Image (tube, rainbow, N blue to C red):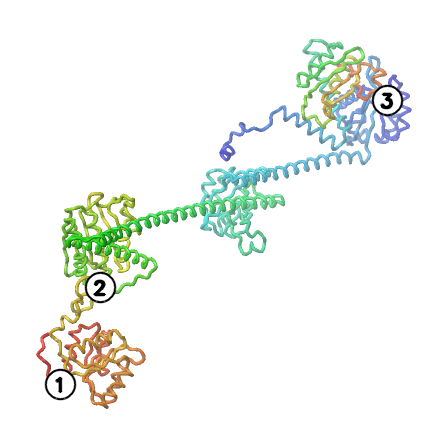
Amino acid sequence: MKSASSPQDFRDFIQLLPEPLLLVGGDSVIHAANRAAAALLEAAPDQLAGQALDAVVATPGDQLQHYLDTCARSRQFVVGALDLKQNQTTAAKRRVRCEGAALRPWSQDAPALLLLRLNLRASAGDRFRLLNQKIEELAREVLERKRAEALVDGQREVLELIAHDAPLEVVLERLMRSAEAQSSAGMLCSILLLEPDGVHLRYGAAPSLPQEYNDAIDGLEIGPHTGSCGTAAYRAEPVIVTDIAADPLWEGYRELALAHGLRACWSTPVFSTHGMSEASREGGAPVLGTFAMYYRQPLAPGADDLELIQLVTRTAAVAIERQRAEEERIKLLESERQARLAAEQANRMKDEFLATVSHELRTPLNAVLGWAEILRLRQFDESTATHAIDTIVRNARAQAQIIEDLLDVSRIISGKLRLNVRRVDLPSIVEAALDAVRPAADAKGIRLQVVLDPGAGPVAGDPDRLQQIVWNLLSNAIRFTPRGGRVQVRLQRVNSHIEILVSDSGVGINPAFLPHIFERFRQEDSSSTRRYGGLGLGLALVRHLVDLHGGTVHADSAGEGHGATFTVTLPVMVLRDGEAKPAAGDVQDGAPESAAKPLSHMDQVLQGLRLLVVEDEPDARELLQTLLAGSGASVTAVASCKDALEALERSQQDGSRPHIIISDIGMPDEDGYDLIRQVRQRGVRIPAIALTAYSRSEDRMRALGAGFQMHIPKPVEPSELIASVSSLASWSVPEREPPAAQRL
Amino acid sequence: MVAQSLVTGNLSELDIPLERDVFLRTLLRELAGTLQDVVGLEEAAGFISVVGQNMGRQLDHDYKAALGVSHLTREQVAAVLVDLKQRIQGRFFIIEEDDDKIVLGTTSCPFAEKVIGRPALCMMTSNVFGSIVAENLGYAKVELQETIATGSPGCRVVVYLKPTLESEATLGREYFQGPPTP
């Protein structure tokens, strides 16, 4: 539209168009209105012509003019909105969309000529509404999308941290911040971790909660009324508290929470991922901790919140479990390492030991072979030959000892070492050990000091092994004491223990080595240049043997160069009242001291007596038989009540009735009481002695009541038994020849 | 430690791309985008035109006041167009200038990368240029021959100073002088 067309042309033109159109001057005077516009403005077209626009439009004047000015500057439609007056008298308004453009611009001669297109179709309003709606929808979508993106990004960050083994605190903190970023209501969240004791919750991560609050809840004990988190962990289900001020669960913690401005708290347990299905949750997937969302105003959760909670708790579970698995793995690795080190150490010690054993076995063997070869090759004078033979014997013995020691250790390890336990008189054991080492001590000019308390004892033990113990300690003492030194042995009773102390003035023991001194294969110096030789088994054997005897051994030393003391303690045997002096045990090297010694003056006291001995235990039976027969009696020994009755029967017939019956009480099938009852029932009035381990006074009374004339408790002194039998015989066997004078 | 820096309150040291220029450019981008999506490119352009016109008038007034003149000559108008763009980091330069038209070009946009995909924002340039030229020289038709917004490496803007055959043949917005200010 180049030429300035006349308004009239335009006026005609707009009449042809159906949309509401106005021709308006830039000075806001209505030039023309078509029928549709007139209808819209509720006026007649010719009424409008010449009117000011603000007569029909309620839009404030300056706004209106501004709009018209803008339209006047542009050939293209400029969109605006006008408020129309309903009719000229009322002030009610309707908003219409208006599009205006300049048909003719301003000039010096005339104002601009504008075409205004008005739009009040239903869809116009709709279009505004639609516009608003669309904008809102779009905004919401954008927000949603951003939230979802943030959520995904946040989760991805957390998972990456987990995958890179970031410390748990870091992971949980990032998770919390990521969750908080999702909320628009100023949400603060926290994770608490359940301790292995299953009772206490400790701080996991809560970067936005006040530190004071976090400190106050750290270590919270779970229970049915302990706020949201404690209760959630206890019940293993979510606990939603929409208003802390009113909820009874928060009673004990209300003030604390309110003081920090916390009004709502939704807590959900973090369940282990092993067994996440609902069914197994019933059975109780373990609770690892709790995830809580706090708000500063009372609030209830929406669907989005529940989704977020699910996501966070699942991610937290993964992180926590991964860290725990990691800790487990490290612990396992460490214990594996320790085990391996221990095994390597043991191996090394065994290797050292083997080397030592070979050396120790070879050394005496060298001497034996060497001297034997020499003897074979040459003739020597007697003293040299004797010396050679002594050397050979000595070394062979030494080697035999080494092998014995090895076998003993092997027996101990495999649990096959048996003790032959009896009552033992320690002084003689110690004496015997001393005798064995005296030559070695003399050879080194070492003084042996002995302090023996004869009242120290008895103990229950194996005399051979006890002697081995003392001998080992003495040998060591002598070996590690230089020429001219001193070794002392002390035997004493201390309360309810017997102590054997072996001390020396020798090289002493390094305090660092002292704790290991009784270990197998351990020597303070196991190098090839070591001075003192030996296998390092002696003390280990001592310790094992002392253990088997129920005792203890320990070593003391003031340090290198200051000698050492070994102390063995053994428990004292419990003596019965009235017991005579204990029998001496067999001693290894001397002639056996037999029980026959005290009886030498009782040799034939039981001459002429016929005795029936009833004892089921073979060794005991043999002993009694030997003892009684050795005193001159004629003994029939049987093993049971039945055999005894048969023997009696036979003796009735052939006239060799026993003069005295000596019977054990405790026998299988029929015991001593049964025997004597049956004997008495048959009217047999042979005197009988009950010889039994049942030794209480009621046993005594029962025996006498059952028909025995005497009751002797086991173990019995042989001389006592002989005397008892003899005494009983003198009262009840008139035809017996009077015995020779007795001296007890 | 990462955790430590998250806990302390000194967020101002974090490396976040946010300051006023970026914020405002982003805001405009978002507005334009929403408008484009909701009402369509043409109408969006239309809305932005109104904005641009108002801004153009204001700038015209500012320059005139600063120069102490009531009216700009063609040379002054061309210089103003270049200068105002320089000031807002759109480095425009004059490619051609004669009685019929002024041709300007640039390789950078004041909106920077935020303009890509937002051709509606070009209406700012069109209207600012158009209204300053029209206000002083009576008429302007602005043709956006090439724009960074639509993917070109640079912008080429032709401002026709009078209706000619050439200007008739092009697509562009026409601007007129407004009423004399009282």
Q: Earlier in the sequence, mark 3 or mark 1?
A: 3
Query: Disc 3 marks which residue?
Result: A31
Query: Disc 1 marks which residue?
Result: A736
Q: Which residue shows up at 50% across the image and 35% down it?
A: B3
Q: Which residue shows up at 17% across the image and 56% down it?
A: A434
Residue toward you, A247 or A214: A214
Location of residue A657 in the rendering, given as x and y in whole percent from the top left corner:
20, 87
Question: Would residue A188 be seen by someone viewing this image from the given angle?
Answer: no
Q: Residue furthest front?
A: A378
Q: CA distance from mark 3 to mark 1?
A: 177 Å
Q: Marks 1 and 2: CB-CB under 8 Å?
A: no
Query: Disc 2 marks which residue?
Result: A573
Which amino acid type is marked by label 2?
Met
Quadrant of res A398: bottom left
Foreground tag (2 vs 3)? 2
Task: Give the letter of the chain under mark 3.
Answer: A
Location of residue A61 in the rendering, given as x and y in whole percent from the top left corner:
76, 23
Q: Earlier in the sequence, mark 2 or mark 3?
A: 3
Task: Give the letter of the chain under mark 2.
Answer: A
Which amino acid type is marked by label 1?
Arg
Specify the quadrant that holds the C terminus of chain B.
top right
Foreground tag (1 vs 2)? 1
Residue toward you, A557 or A376: A376
Question: Would residue B113 be seen by someone viewing this image from the given angle?
Answer: yes
Q: Say whether mark 1 and mark 3 are on the same chain.
A: yes
